[in-house]
Image (cartoon, rainbow, N blue to C red):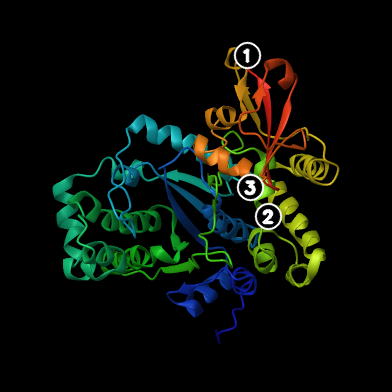
């Protein structure tokens, strides 16, 4: 990139690796240097919690506010009823209004950790406010006429679906029009002049810019972040156990801390710049550590990211638990609990049955393979016999289960 931004926000975006593309970098930079700008990112309420894949853009909103601007978190109470088809192989399941609102309630808890809301601070809006009341014929006449179906079919997010001869419903096809209308409406109501999002949203963002130019003859901008993969090619935010949720009720702070502690060596410096607020030079220093020393960088990364989301006490507790579990062989007070009723142990319960019934392995077959490979320990003692029987008395107040080197749980009797 040859252009050197003057504004603090775009300087941060470039230096820390957040920037993938911008519709007009110089015009946006000029606006940011002249005074506060309002920007938004939209979040459809498709799950009860945001996950680590959302965290990059949440950090962008946080930096946007820290550099003197006003961020909007736009909840997709309206657009979730349609579902974004971008780069999906099939239509999203339709959610009821109650389910959508419940998901929004869960997502809002996370945003409050990263942004300061209030009269002059960040804004949390819901696009159902204007989408739910649209008159279909008026919308077609006033907004729909500005969209070319030929152009809409050319966007990669749509074309990739059609090229694979996978069905794209008319409902989904409307999504990009509704998202474009969101940008127009936010400009009208709140002078919002910037939409940010992942690079997979580029087509939707450009649609909103074009619509606003056609309807109001106003200049607004779009900025996208890269879609991250880890250095070993995995999609950021996915782990062997599934999505890495940001709500503590769905993923414990300890498990969240462990996700970051297990970062691949090559990703440490990059992730420190993207997911923490440490100075860039310190991120580079920690990321350049070699050998066993890189673990110090991973611990800093885990502590900093966990502190932002769950607080300093939760980060310190997670680190202490990890040290006890891994370095001292202890049980660790923050290990995720797995509970089974005492009746399950009547007559003895094999370790294979215990692993399968608690969901720690996907099946008894997987449990047997884990044991055969030497991957199971109970209270730090290796288990070699898949038919070993457990009793409720043996579980007692708690039994530490270790699956491999990095996955640990605490088994307890329910009730």
Instruction: Residue 169 in the image: state x and y as whole percent.
Output: 19, 51
Q: Which residue is drawn at 47% across and 74% down?
A: 21
Which of the image's four quarters has the N terminus? Answer: bottom right
**Element type where label 3 sits in the image:** loop
Question: Which residue is at a point 33% across and 36% down the rendered structure image?
Answer: 95
Q: Is residue 347 above or below residue 268?
A: above
> Which mark is nearer the camera, 2 or 3?
3
Q: Determine the CA span between mark 1 and mark 3.
A: 29 Å
Q: In this view, does 57 lie to the left or right of 264?
A: left
First-in-chain label (2 vs 1): 2
Residue 147 % position (x, y): 20, 65
Q: Residue at x 78, y 65 (%)?
A: 294
Give the camera-side residue of 148 and 103: 103
Q: Distance between the residues labelled 2 and 1?
A: 34 Å
Nearest to N terminus: mark 1 or mark 3: 1
Q: Which of 323 and 328 is in front in this view?
A: 328
Picture quadrant of residue 118: top right
- Return the residue at label 3: 373
Please tell me whether mark 2 or mark 1 is closer to you in this view.
1
Q: What element carries label 1?
A: helix
For the residue carrying disc 3, how many other residues have a C-alpha within 10 Å: few (<14), some (14-19), or many (20+)?
few
Which disc number belongs to residue 342? 1
């Amino acid at each position: 990139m040859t252009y050197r931004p003057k504004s603090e926000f775009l300087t941060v975006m470039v230096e820390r690796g957040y920037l993938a593309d911008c519709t007009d970098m110089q015009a946006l930079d000029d606006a940011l240097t002249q005074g506060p700008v309002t920007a938004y990112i939209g979040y459809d309420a498709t799950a009860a919690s945001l996950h680590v894949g959302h965290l990059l853009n949440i950090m962008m909103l946080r930096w946007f506010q820290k550099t003197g601007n006003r961020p909007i978190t736009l909840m997709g109470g309206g657009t979730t009823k349609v579902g974004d088809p971008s780069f999906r192989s099939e239509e999203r399941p339709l959610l009821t209004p109650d389910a959508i609102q419940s998901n929004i309630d869960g997502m809002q808890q996370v945003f409050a950790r990263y942004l300061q809301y209030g009269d002059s601070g960040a804004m949390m809006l819901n696009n159902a406010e204007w989408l739910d009341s649209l008159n279909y014929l008026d919308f077609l006449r006033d907004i729909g006429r500005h969209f070319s179906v030929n152009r809409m079919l050319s966007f990669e997010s749509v074309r990739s679906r059609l090229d694979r001869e996978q069905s794209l419903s008319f409902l989904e096809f409307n999504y990009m029009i509704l998202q474009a209308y969101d940008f127009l409406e936010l400009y009208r109501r709140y002078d919002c002049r910037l939409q940010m999002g992942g690079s997979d949203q580029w087509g939707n963002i450009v649609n909103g810019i074009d619509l606003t130019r056609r309807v109001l003859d106003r200049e607004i901008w779009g900025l996208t972040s890269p879609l991250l993969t880890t250095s070993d090619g995995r999609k950021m935010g996915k782990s062997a156990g599934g999505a890495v949720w940001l709500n503590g009720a769905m993923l414990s702070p300890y498990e969240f801390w462990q996700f970051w502690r297990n970062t691949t060596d090559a990703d440490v410096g990059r992730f420190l710049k993207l997911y923490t607020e440490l100075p860039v030079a310190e991120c580079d220093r920690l990321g350049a550590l070699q050998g066993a020393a890189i673990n110090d960088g991973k611990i800093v990364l885990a502590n900093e990211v966990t502190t932002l989301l769950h607080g300093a006490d939760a980060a310190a507790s997670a680190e202490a638990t990890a040290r006890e579990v891994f370095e001292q062989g202890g049980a660790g007070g923050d290990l995720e609990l797995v509970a089974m009723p005492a009746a399950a142990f009547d007559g003895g319960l094999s370790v294979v049955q215990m692993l399968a019934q608690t969901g720690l392995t996907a099946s008894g077959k997987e449990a047997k393979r884990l044991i055969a490979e030497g991957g199971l320990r109970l209270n730090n003692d290796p288990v070699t016999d898949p038919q070993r029987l457990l009793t409720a008395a043996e579980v007692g107040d708690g039994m530490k289960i270790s699956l491999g080197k990095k996955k640990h749980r605490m088994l307890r009797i329910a009730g």
